[in-house]
Image (cartoon, grey):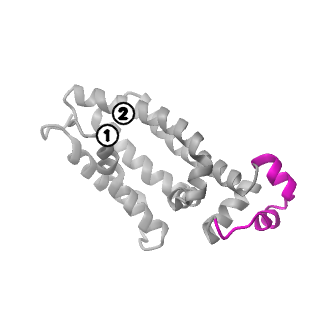
Amino acid sequence: MILRSALRLFNRHGFAATSIDDLRRASGASVGSIYHHFGGKEGVAAELYVRALEGYQQDVLDLIRGNPTAREGIDGIVHHHLEWVEKHPDEARFLLMRSPEVLLASKKRVRALNRGFFGEVFDWLDKQAAAGRIRKVPRHLIFTLVIGPSQELSREWLEGRVDEPLTSAADLLADAAWYSIREGGEER
C-alpha cells in the first residue's frame, strides 16, 4: 500500500513536493513503518524505481534469451517498450521523471541491474553484428536508434498529447528501428 500510494503521489506532485507525512496519510502506514521498511521517502522512491526498471528489463531479457533473429529481436524490443508503457503508465511516468534524488537513492541497485541487463543485450547485439545481420553501432547510440522514437512517442502519450494507443505505432516504429541498424539493406 505504501508503494502504490507513493507512486500516485510522486506522479501527481513530484518527488520533492511529496512529504513523508503525505505518504503516511495516503498509505495509512505510520511514519515509523515507512522508515522501518524503506529508510525514508528516498528509500520508497528508490524501491519504486528499481521495481519498475527491473520489470521492464526482465521482459527484454526474456525476449533475447529466446534466441530471436536480429529482426525479431529489434521488433520485439520496440513492441515491448510501447506495450510496457501502455500497460504501466504510472511506472513509466515515474521512470521518466528522473528526479536527481531518486536517481541518487537508487544508484547502486540500478547500476547492478543495468550491468546485467546491458551486458546481455549488448552481447546479443554484438553476436548479431558479428554475423553481419546488423551494423556495428557504437553502444551509446544503439538504444537511441532502436527505442529513441518510441521513447519520445511514449513521453508525448504520457503527457496526453497523443490520443492513439502507443501500440498502434509499434509496427512503423519497429520498421524504422530495423532500417536504422540493419546491415546491407537485407531482411535477415
Q: On the image, numbered disc 1 is attached to which residue? A: 139
Q: Where is residue 111 in the image (x, y as percent from the top left)?
A: 52, 39
| Magenta: main secondary structure | helix
- The amino acid beneath tag 1 is Arg
Give the total number of marks visible in the rendering.
2
Check whether the beta carbons of the residues at disc 2 and disc 1 lie within 8 A of each other. Answer: yes
Tell which tag, 2 or 1, sits nearer the viewer. Answer: 1
- Residue drawn at x 69%, y 68% as measured from the top left: 18
Left or right of 45? Residue 186 is: left
Q: Where is residue 133 in the image (x, y as percent from the top left)?
A: 21, 32
Neighbour class for label 2 at 10 Å: few (<14), some, many (≥20)? few
Magenta region: 16-38
User: Against 102, is 182 above or below?
Assistant: above
Secondary structure under badge 1? helix
Q: On the image, numbered disc 2 is attached to which residue? A: 122
User: From this viewpoint, is residue 68 visible?
Assistant: no
Marks 2 and 1, the one that precedes in the sequence: 2
Asked whether residue 88 is drawn in magenta, I would say no
Asked where in the image residue 63 lies, by quadrant, the reply is top left
User: Which is more toward the observer, 112 or 176?
Assistant: 112
- The amino acid beneath tag 2 is Phe
Left or right of 20? Residue 181 is: left
